[in-house]
Amino acid sequence: MSKQAPIPGSWQRAMLPLLLLAELSDGQAHGYALSKSLQERGFGPIKGATLYPALAKLEAAGLVKTRWQDGQGGPGRKVYELAAAGRAELAGQRDSFAKLAALVQSTGN
């Protein structure tokens, strides 16, 4: 773990949908791979009880598409892919986040 302070849990919960969309912009992935990739980037561990409802909400909103992939010697798994609406949502969310970050950086200077 880096020497930086951990990201507060409330921030992680709020940012999880945006980060999942961002992860999927690199290509399709299953839930466990998404969780591991975010954790490797410095996001705290994501429990399945948090991850999979967030992915289900993105799917219900039409932002991600899913398909089942046969397992190799084990059960199949759901694979997530960014939908066109998800790409548009991600672009808008990134813009909003950039504005928020700029506001935070400029406050108190």
Image: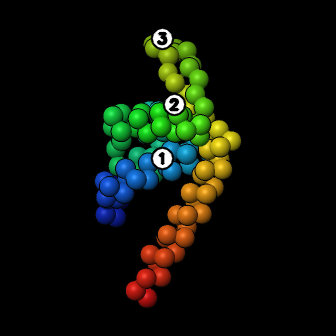
3 on left or right of 56: left
Residue 13 placement, left or right of 29: left
Earlier-in-chain disc, 1 versus 3: 1
Name the spot of residue 61 as percent of width and height, x first.
Answer: 55, 38
Residue that mark 1 sits on = 17
Between disc 1 and disc 2, the foreground one is 1
Earlier in the chain: of badge 1 and badge 2, it is 1
Q: Is residue 12 above or below residue 108?
A: above
Q: Secondary structure at mark 3?
A: loop
Checking the image for residue 29, the label placed there is none
Residue at the front extreme, as displayed = 61
Q: Specify the label residue 30 is tagged with.
A: 2
Instruction: Check the picture and name the quadrant holding the N terminus.
Output: bottom left
Q: Residue at x 43, y 39 (%)?
A: 54
Compared with residue 12, is residue 59 higher up or lower down, i.e. above or below?
A: above
Name, please, the residue furthest toward the bottom. 109
> Where is residue 23 drawn, in percent x and y?
55, 45
